[in-house]
Image: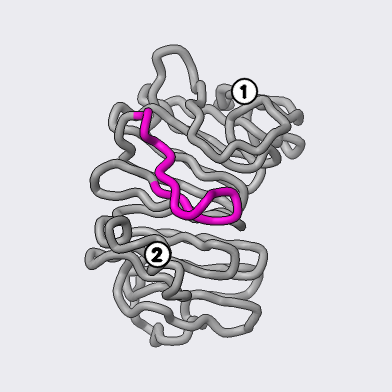
Amino acid sequence: IGSSELVSDVNGLASGIEAYGSRVVWSDSVACFSTSAGVYCQEGRSNWNQTQAIASNDLAILGENPCSVFASGMVCEDASLVNSIGTSVTNYAIDIGGSEENLCVLTAFGSIHCVGEDYTGVERINDDIEPFIELWSSPKTVCGLTVSHALYCWGESSGPNGQASSTDNWLPVKVNIGVDAIASDISLSPDHACALRNSGKAVCWGAGTDGQLGYGFTSDSDTYRLVEVAN
């Protein structure tokens, strides 16, 4: 992780002990990853410190504050954040997504509740959308899948929120990934995103100056581009 750190260098993971990673998240000042042995974070220091000793179901960061979802509920490094969201949400949390300024919590009922700079208190943001089943996030964007595998994204206009707009959008907006196509998996970076369609084909959108959209050109695209596979 990073340029030099290895899992064997992580405090609490003894040499020769296997730990299977499941999620890596980061912000400008914090990086965290979850393993089968627990959650570890590095915040402006050379050593990784364990924050939870059990594997988490998901992991996200709000600014400098890492949060995890466990079978028993939601835990944040800053306990006041959990208290501000409320146990009616955190006790039923199954997934979370975080950006630099906001944190969104998905409950077992399919509802999404967000808190942060761009929300007034704790806001439920999917009242008019079918239930969600999963969230993904990057420092600028949060995306989610609904029960019918429709893809929705929200976040900063400079991130891959799937909208051809210069305005930030903090409510879920459906992302077009192709006619009659539904998503089975998502990958997000700070400036581009990719979705795996139910057909097995992949599409990407966002920044493409380094060819990361995979369609043969080095230009940005607000709309999806089909990833081309070399023969």
Instruction: Give percent across and percent down for residue 84.
Output: 42, 65
Kind of residue at disc 1: Thr
Q: Which residue is denoted by mark 1 in the rendering?
A: 223
Q: Residue furthest front?
A: 120
Q: Residues within 10 Å of mark 2 (few under 14, many from 20)?
A: some
Residue at 56% of width from left, 40% of height from top? 170
Q: Determine the image quadrant of residue 101.
A: bottom right
Instruction: Give percent across and percent down for residue 203.
Output: 53, 27
Vertical comparison of 138 with 175: above or below? below
Which sits in the foreground, 25 or 121?
121
Which of the marked residues, 2 or 1, is nearer the chain's N terminus? 2
Q: Which mark is residue 208?
A: none
Q: Which residue is denoted by mark 2 in the rendering?
A: 21
Instruction: Give percent across and percent down for residue 60.
Output: 47, 60
Badge 1 marks a residue whose secondary structure is: strand
Locate the C terminus by quadrant.
Answer: top right
Magenta-drawn stretch contains 124: yes
Kind of residue at disc 2: Gly
